[in-house]
Image (spheres, coloured by chain):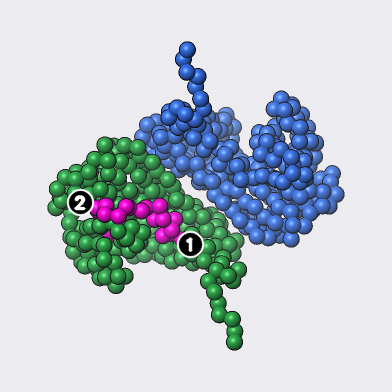
Chain colours: A green, B blue
Amino acid sequence: MKKAYVHGYDPRENIRLQDQASTLVELLHSDTLYPPGSRVLEAGCGVGAQTVTLARNSPQAVITSIDISASSVAEAARTAAESGLSNVHFQQADIFNLPFGPDSFDHIFVCFVLEHLPKPVEALLALTKVLKAGGTITVIEGDHGSAYFHPDSVAARRAIQCQVQLQRRAGGNANVGRELYPLLCEAGYASVRVSPRMVYVDASKPALVDGFIRKTFTAMIEGVRQSALKAGIAERREFEEGIRDLYRTAEADGVFCYTFFKALGVKT
Amino acid sequence: MKKAYVHGYDPRENIRLQDQASTLVELLHSDTLYPPGSRVLEAGCGVGAQTVTLARNSPQAVITSIDISASSVAEAARTAAESGLSNVHFQQADIFNLPFGPDSFDHIFVCFVLEHLPKPVEALLALTKVLKAGGTITVIEGDHGSAYFHPDSVAARRAIQCQVQLQRRAGGNANVGRELYPLLCEAGYASVRVSPRMVYVDASKPALVDGFIRKTFTAMIEGVRQSALKAGIAERREFEEGIRDLYRTAEADGVFCYTFFKALGVKT
């Protein structure tokens, strides 16, 4: 009988497991743990992409996840139910008109939300109202201006700029990550600390080559093709060249760098 | 009698000490420690800026530091003597024509050198010849394309590009950091691992605001003013605006990001 595979005892499998452990979820969320019984507001949960991790990492916290889109909230609730989560309550609500009284929450969690808002400081101020004094806010955002790679490519950089410009036209800021420190300070938070979470990918990290370079970042830039062409900010041939060059960085001699920013502030 | 100040027991002083501990030297060098008796070659020591840290971190290693410039080597030797180092031997030598036999060294250390070389892989291959099988090479390089900041500024980015262009004209590559993985692989090293060392600076880190934004990075870009104007790649007014904007990132609401890359490879 062939010896059964045991997790962690096969050297190659060990590398793969370590590789997976260092993927995005771990990198962004592993140090966010809320105490048992603490009341946590997740503002802008969307379809619940971060909610499952948030709720699993703090299984005894009582989490309220809101989003302005009723259909997103419904989708998030389905995902949470399928994942067997029992510590999350979902609710359709607008950050700028929250249906909660003062001191309703011990902690607030905001992930990939400020990038979409024309007035991020106002959003932070609105959230602060429902947070108790001494409570914390955690904010995670990306920054497309932090992307650089080898081989470098003007076309690839221009393709990324299409996404940045489209997000700006929609009132958002794809480069908001680097601004978390001044934003939280301006919203009155104290003891603000920002820690960058850099995703460095080369061929020694095959899970990230596929999971991050191809399926996360380049797929996202590819996703704005039609909007960019329609808006007249890209020429089809050059855009395709840019996408090709982004995929090129996933080859054996390629390198890709991107940085997320995570900020923590305390309400005084 | 006023109570004497004790290191680490004053809260404010504690912050300052932590701040200093997280400066560049710590970030880049703290995990390079060579065993007692091991023979280490520092290739391209220049005036010895890294030699002192290297020798102090591995006090019982036997270090040979070389540089192609005899005057730099003399200066490095003076600095080492003033620092009381006794485990470093200095020698004028060319990486491409090393006066050492095969297997002369157990480890090689190369810091801020490849950025100046037109043929970095050839340099690595030349170094490999004097390294024993199973020995390691450690390479540290910056990457000016990794610099981004808030407030963002086109003029500041153009000023940085002046330095990048001048270095390219001189045969070097100011963006070499991101390429360490493919370079070491191409030179035949095995088990290559690259770890980025990101310097993130905001107003909560006053020592880095002054030490890195002002006195390291911006001072370096300011240093190419005359060469950039002379080469006709910059217009004085815009260059000055760029420098002003770089200093602007050192203000209370500013943020500055830069990444160094550290690579380790093993000779098979």
The residue furthest front is: B1
Q: Is residue B234 visible?
A: no
Q: Residue at x 78, y 35 (%)?
A: B90
Tell me which corner region of the image, top left, top right, bottom left or bottom right, holds residue B39. top right
Q: Is residue B146 left or right of residue B31?
A: left
In the depicted structure, whether residue B110 falls above or below residue A92? above
Indicate the position of residue A145 as horizontal and vertical percent values.
Answer: 42, 49
What span is in magenta? Answer: A23-47
Q: Is residue A156 visible?
A: yes
Q: Residue at x 76, y 50 (%)?
A: B106
Q: Nearer the viewer, mark 2 or mark 1?
A: 1
Mark 2 secondary-structure assignment: loop
Would residue A29 be counted in the magenta stretch?
Answer: yes
The CA distance from mark 2 to mark 1 is 33 Å
Chain at numbered mark 1 = A
Would residue A132 be counted in the magenta stretch?
Answer: no
Indicate the position of residue A151 as horizontal and vertical percent values.
Answer: 56, 57
User: What is the three-letter code of the residue carrying label 1?
Assistant: Ala
Tell me which corner region of the image, top left, top right, bottom left or bottom right, holds residue B156. top left
Tell me whether the residue at label 2 lies in contact with that at label 1, contact meaning CB atoms closer than 8 angstroms. Answer: no
Q: Nearer the viewer, residue A35 or A245?
A: A35
Estimate how packed mark 2 is, as few (under 14), some (14 to 19) or many (20 or more) residues with alpha carbons within 10 Å: some
Q: Nearer the viewer, residue B12 or B79?
A: B12
Q: Earlier in the sequence, mark 2 or mark 1?
A: 1
The residue furthest top is: B1
Q: What label sits on residue A142 in the rendered view?
A: none
Indicate the position of residue A37 as horizontal and vertical percent values.
Answer: 26, 54
Mark 1 secondary-structure assignment: helix
- In the rendered image, which residue does mark 1 sit on? A21
Of the 4 image quadrants, the one containing the N terminus of chain A is bottom right
Estimate how packed mark 1 is, as few (under 14), some (14 to 19) or many (20 or more) residues with alpha carbons within 10 Å: few
Q: What label sits on residue A95 in the rendered view?
A: 2
